[in-house]
Image (cartoon, rainbow, N blue to C red):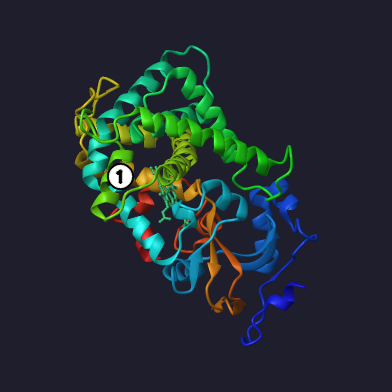
Amino acid sequence: RWTATRDKNCKLPMPKGSMGFPFIGETCHWLLQGSGFHASRKQKYGNVFKTHLLGRPLIRVTGAENVRKVLMGEHTLVTVDWPQSTSTLLGPNSLANSIGDIHRKRRKVFAKVFSHEALESYLPKIQQVIQESLRVWSSNPEPINVYRESQRLSFTMAVRVLLGFRVSEEEMRHLFSTFQDFVDNLFSLPIDLPFSGYRKGIRARDTLQKSIEKAIRRSPLCSQGKDYSDALDVLMESAKENGTELTMQELKESTIELIFAAFATTASASTSLIMQLLRHPPVLERLREELRARGLLHNGCLCPEGELRLDTIVSLKYLDCVIKEVLRLFTPVSGAYRTAMQTFELDGVQIPKGWSVMYSIRDTHDTFAVFKDVDAFDPDRFSQERGEDKEG
Ligand code: HEM
């Protein structure tokens, strides 16, 4: 029945691939095989293949040129469109669910949250939360689970620093475990039955929204009276500057979306960074030298709170290369979802109008021809002299 959805006006063939079983498609294979699922199908069918995941048909796209065409075709060839479970759980007011002009406007409002000025204002609090966590980690005589601790750190940072919520330790623990239930079920089969992942995700979202509403009502709704502006203040201010006021529902959905976007990505990236630094002592030593040269590291201790400036971080060129190399080898986000607004061509096959497209970041990094010795951890490939990334 899937060939019926090909665009008959287009002479190009459909992508190869298997649609699996009725309704569940290849979802079980995907869940069981993890990243091996895409790798095996890519090997069998090529860079553009069709499958059926999370209750809907999907075309999976790999390869720098193909991904570039999808990303450059935002609002003309494709539009953002996440699986049904993700859309429902994030809510209708989220960026992930906004298309066309609404997405452009919302993105403009969000942009101020990431402006140089805003990032500079979060910095002292970020530094404080990181230093407190590092102190606890290093005073613990037992081995620590870096990924779990990084998740906790990213979550605390998102809740306390970015969103400025004053919540007790106990509330924070409860929020963290509810948030994990929410994230674990964001990508699930959209079957709303008792004990299904989807139902669990909906329950977690409702609990989170209630706690967030309580926290928003408790905190002063603007930076006046605070010693810094948090991302929520900036978001509300930016909305006003763009001629709108955010409703409580919009605020709650934006808050959950921001925590979701920041939490798993940052925790994954910082865990991979720590792992690679432990595996590559010369890289760690060069990083320390760079920090010492900027006066940021004295006798093994990071500079005291409040001294760090955004310009200083931006000037740490070797750190930049190390982070890029970590993100290249251990991509925290495997890819993202779009829907074809019109039929278009990729790699000699048709992407029919209305089909979902998932562009793959991880598989593209793995196979991108411009990177020499792709499996090696080699931060200098991003240095000004070599600039391998500039060749792509
Ligand atoms: C290593 C860390 C991170 C990685 C690898 C990462 C990756 C990504 C990717 C690949 C997208 C595009 C998704 C798409 O095409 O639909 C994205 C979007 C987004 N990210 Fe991140 N992200 C990171 C950290 C963060 C943080 C810390 C925040 C917020 C504090 C954030 C907020 C967002 C938002 C709001 C969007 C949606 C933009 C839009 O739809 O216009 N991200 N991120």
Label 1 within 8 A of ligand 1 by Cβ: no
Query: Crowding at label 1, few (<14), some or many (≥20) Cα neighbours within 10 Å?
Result: many
Left or right, 58 with respect to 212, comes to right
View extreme (right): residue: 21
| Quadrant assignment, res 345 | bottom right
Determine the residue positioned at 50% across, 39% down: 264
Disc 1 on helix, strand or loop? Answer: helix
Looking at the rendered structure, the number of numbered marks drawn on it comes to 1
Q: In the rendering, at what x and y percent does residue 347 appear? A: 57, 76
* Of residues 119 and 319, the one drawn nearer to the viewer in this rendering: 119
Q: Which of 306 and 225 is in front in this view?
A: 225
Q: Residue at x 73, y 78 (%)?
A: 4
- Front residue of 83 and 153: 83
Establish if 203 lies above or below 364: above
Q: In this view, does 87 lie to the left or right of 230?
A: right
Residue 41 position (above or below residue 231): below
Answer whether residue 242 is visible to the viewer in this image.
Answer: yes
Q: In this view, does 164 lie to the left or right of 182?
A: left
The type of residue carrying mark 1 is: Met
Q: Is residue 315 visible?
A: no
User: Residue at horizontal 56%, vertical 40%?
Assistant: 183
Q: Which residue is drawn at 51% across and 34% down?
A: 208
Quadrant of image for the N terminus: bottom right
In percent of width and height, residue 197 lies at 68, 41
Q: Where is residue 321 in the image (x, y as percent from the top left)?
A: 35, 47
* Residue 300 screen position, x and y as percent: 30, 21
Q: In which quarter of the image is the C terminus?
A: bottom left
**Residue beneath label 1, please?**
236
Left or right? Give the position of 340 relative to 163: right
